[in-house]
Each structure stands twice: as C-alpha cells, then as structure tokens.
Amino acid sequence: MKKFVLAVSAIMLMTGTANAERYVMVTHGEGKDPFWPVVEKAGADAAAQMGVDFEYIFNPSGDLADMASSIQAAAATQPDGMVVSLPDPDSLGNAIRAAVDSGVPVITINSGLEAYKEVGALMHIGQPETLAGQKAGERAAAEGATKALCMTPEQYNTALSDRCNGYGENVNIVSSVDTTHDAATIVTRATAALQANPDVNAVLSVSPTSCIGTAKALDDLGMSVHHSCFDLSPELMDLINAGKVAFTIDQQQRLQGYMPIVVLHLYNNSAGLLPGDNIPSGPGFVDKSNASAVSALAGIDR
C-alpha cells in the first residue's frame, strides 16, 4: 500500500510539473552587463512565488538575428507567456508578432516602449528612456555641464540612443561614442574620444560597463569632468561614493523582471486581467546621499 501511495504521489507530482504554467524571458545583451542577472533573478523570484516555471534566455553573441531566432524557438514551445526586451523593433518585430499570432501573450520590458503596441505586446514595463535622459541632462546642466560626450555600448539599441538624445536637450552632446561592453575596449575608445575632445566638461555613460571604463580613462588622463551614468553595479556605487561619478539613473530592473511574470500569471488566471497602463520602473537618482544604502543591493536586487 505504501508503495502504491508513493507511486501515485510521484505521478501527481510529475503531472503537476508538466501542467504548471511556464513563462519564458528573452533579453538582449552579451552577458557582460551586470544589469541582466538582476532581471533574471527577479523573474525567477516571481515565478517561485507564483508557483510557475520560468526560463531565461539570452544570446552571448549579442546578435539580434540570434535573439529573433531564440524568440521564435521559445514561441514554438507554446509557453503560457513570454517576456521580451525590444532594443530594435525592425530586427525583432516579426518574431514577436509571430509569437503573438500563435497565441502566446507577450509583455515587453526594458526597451521598446514606443513600439510595444505595433509588435502586438500586451503592455510594456520599463523606464521611459527619453524622459530619463532629460532628467539626467537637467540635473547635469544645473551642476555645470555644458558640453558632453555620450558613451554607449550598443549603438543599435534605440533605448540607449533615447537616453543620449534626452540628455542632449539640456547639455550639448558633441559626439556619441560606441564603447562596446568589453572592458579594455571601453577604456581605449573613451580615452581616444576624450583626447579628441579636450574641451568637454561632461560625460554621460549610459551603462554601468561604459561608466566604469570611462571613469578609468578619465583617471588615466587626469581629467576632471561632470560624469553621470545609468543603472547600478557595486563598482559604480564605489565611484559615486569616491566622488568620481555625480549620479546614476536607477531604472529598477528588479521591477522589469518581477512584474511581467506576476502580470502574465494574473492575465492567464483572471480572465485577461491587466493593469490599466504600462508600468514605468524609473527614472530615479542614486547619488552620494543614498549610494551607501543602495550599494548592498546593487547587482542583486537593484
């Protein structure tokens, strides 16, 4: 009898696992940016609390054609929902639309606010990037910035371009520098750009990797400029506390990973229940006044 009960329990467990809701998250990037592990952890945390299965996919190549293929492959498994970042609607739009047409509900996160409707997504969770750039530029200008370089690791990423463009409404950007995510390349390219533009008095770095590499280039050159950044990492918090970075914009990536799993679970179990609008996760400022409080969570939940 005991063996029978154990066998039935095992079958029920396997059946429950097979029938569990399953959500897949596909994001861009090359795996070198400290931003995405926080998003992945948040999605997994939400899935555990909702009692659903979760899979996270990224393409180490950073190639958007590879990402589109990953979206197509994930959609073919017919998950209960997908969460997708949208850095380039032209490259990824067809794959996302095909997923939606096949019956998979999709929520876009992080980048793609302006294009989520045209690809058929239910909603977008992320930071309005132009607004975030504007706020960064307003504060930088108030702190004396007038002429700047914009350091960006992904020239194809429309969200990062929006950050530069928004900042440029308040501070004159003389050049946008393609840094890549490679640590050594960032320092080399930032150094070259700073040497070619010795009269700039500000730099905007739109990612933690570009921020850290640019800070090193500034140190190596002995240059002192107003340096502001985007997103969080432990190293970036140290730069703020050391007075080498004025502030960084926090888009709260934990919300971008956590909330779409919760929303999709509600959507699937509550007759299409959805928030009344998109969920803006930022922008917020981290500077010397709060960096120490935030630093313990940087790279983990912030």
Image (cartoon, rainbow, N blue to C red):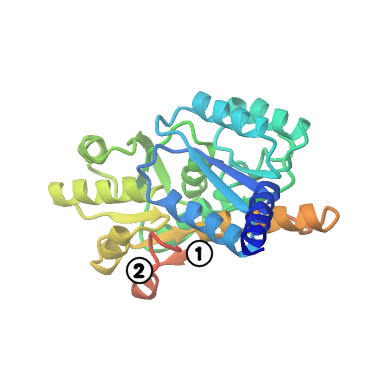
Residue at horizontal 32%, vertical 55%? 227
As drawn, 300 above or below 186: below
Q: Residues within 10 Å of mark 2 (few under 14, many from 20)?
A: many
For the residue pair 89 and 272, the one nearer the viewer reads as 272
Determine which of the numbered discs, if any, sits on residue 284 in the image: 1
Q: Residue furthest front?
A: 1
Task: Locate residue 39, reporting x and y percent.
Answer: 50, 53
Residue 169 seen in the figure: yes
Residue at horizontal 51%, vertical 40%? 57
Task: Locate residue 299, reporting x and y percent.
Answer: 38, 59
Figure quadrant of residue 294 = bottom left
Amino acid at pointer 1: Gly
For the residue pair 141 and 97, the one nearer the viewer reads as 97
Q: Secondary structure at mark 2?
A: helix
Residue at horizontal 73%, vertical 42%? 105
Q: Nearer the viewer, mark 1 or mark 2?
A: 2
How many numbered callouts? 2
Figure quadrant of residue 188 = top left
As drawn, 5 above or below 221: below
Task: Locate residue 194, reporting x and y percent.
Answer: 24, 40
Q: Residue furthest right?
A: 271
Amino acid at pointer 2: Ser
Task: Locate residue 89, reporting x and y percent.
Answer: 61, 31
In terms of sequence position, does the residue under pointer 1 or pointer 2 come before the other? 1
Residue 281 seen in the figure: no
As drawn, 183 above or below 245: above
Residue at horizontal 61%, vertical 34%? 74
Residue position for label 2: 295
